[in-house]
Each structure stands twice: as structure tokens, then as C-alpha cells.
Image (cartoon, rainbow, N blue to C red):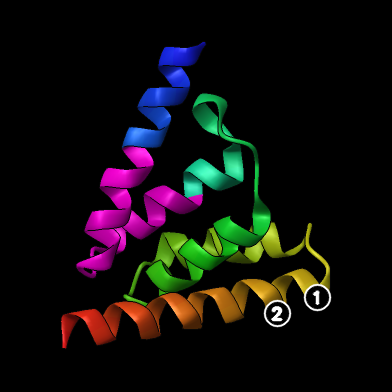
Amino acid sequence: MGNSLKSARFLIESRLQDAARGDAQACYDLGIVYSSGSDGIDVDLIEAHKWFNIAAMSGSDHAQECRAEIAEDMSAREIIEAQKAARAWLSATSRRAA
């Protein structure tokens, strides 16, 4: 079990690096990890919504569908929190890229 959690954390870290470079597929993958709770990572719909939102802004139709799907299981407050988190991530990464 320890190894799968380690590999999941490694997957997330490598996907985060790709996401920071504007890789929409990496953002989508992070959304999948957090929405499905794969590899010992807890399901976190706010985090999943954030990543699907960022991927959708980059033009991913799949991400738009996934975001809409998980939004049905979230409260309005959770969705607002996810949107704020997405804006914060985008603003932090655009500053780093500039």
C-alpha cells in the first residue's frame, strides 16, 4: 500500500509540473485523480473541479463534461471555493511564467 501511495504522489507531482507549464492534459489527469480517488488518494471534488476548470479553460471538452458531472455532487459553496482555487493557481502560474 505504501508504494501505491508513493507512486500516486509522484504522479501528482509530475502532473503538477506539467500543469504549471500550461499542459491541459495534465490538468485533466489531475481532475481524474481527485474525482476518482485513485491510487490511495482521497476523493476531493473541490480539487477535482479546480483541475477540470483549468483544463476546460485550455480548451478540453472532456474536462468541461467532467466538471459539469461532479458539480452536481457539490454544494454552491464548494463550487465557489473550487473556482477561487482555480483562479489562484492560474494567477500564481502566470506570474511564474512571466
Which numbered tag is attached to residue 61? none
Left or right? Give the position of 91 relative to 42: left
Q: Position of residue 54 (x, y in %)?
A: 42, 72
| Above/below status of 5 relative to 43 | above
Which numbered tag is attached to residue 77? 1
Q: Which quadrant would residue 79 be assigned to in this image?
A: bottom right
Crowd around label 1: few <14 · some 14–19 · many ≥20 (10 Å): few
| Above/below status of 15 relative to 46 | above
Q: Position of residue 64 (x, y in %)?
A: 50, 68
Left or right? Give the position of 92 relative to 80: left
Magenta stretch: includes residue 23: yes
Q: Main secondary structure of the magenta part?
A: helix
The residue at 50%/75% (across/down) is 86
Which numbered tag is attached to residue 80? 2
Q: Which residues are magenta?
A: 11-31
Considering depth in this image, is 97 or 55 the residue closer to the camera? 97
Considering depth in this image, is 13 or 80 the residue closer to the camera? 13
Crowd around label 2: few <14 · some 14–19 · many ≥20 (10 Å): some
Badge 2 element: helix
Please count the marks in the image.
Answer: 2
The residue at 50%/25% (across/down) is 39
Left or right? Give the position of 50 relative to 27: right
Q: Amino acid at mark 1?
A: Arg
* Discs 2, 1 touching: Cβ within 8 Å: yes
Q: Position of residue 59 (x, y in %)?
A: 33, 75
The residue at 79%/57% (across/down) is 73
Q: Amino acid at mark 2?
A: Ile
Magenta stretch: includes residue 97: no
The residue at 16%/88% (across/down) is 98
Badge 1 element: helix
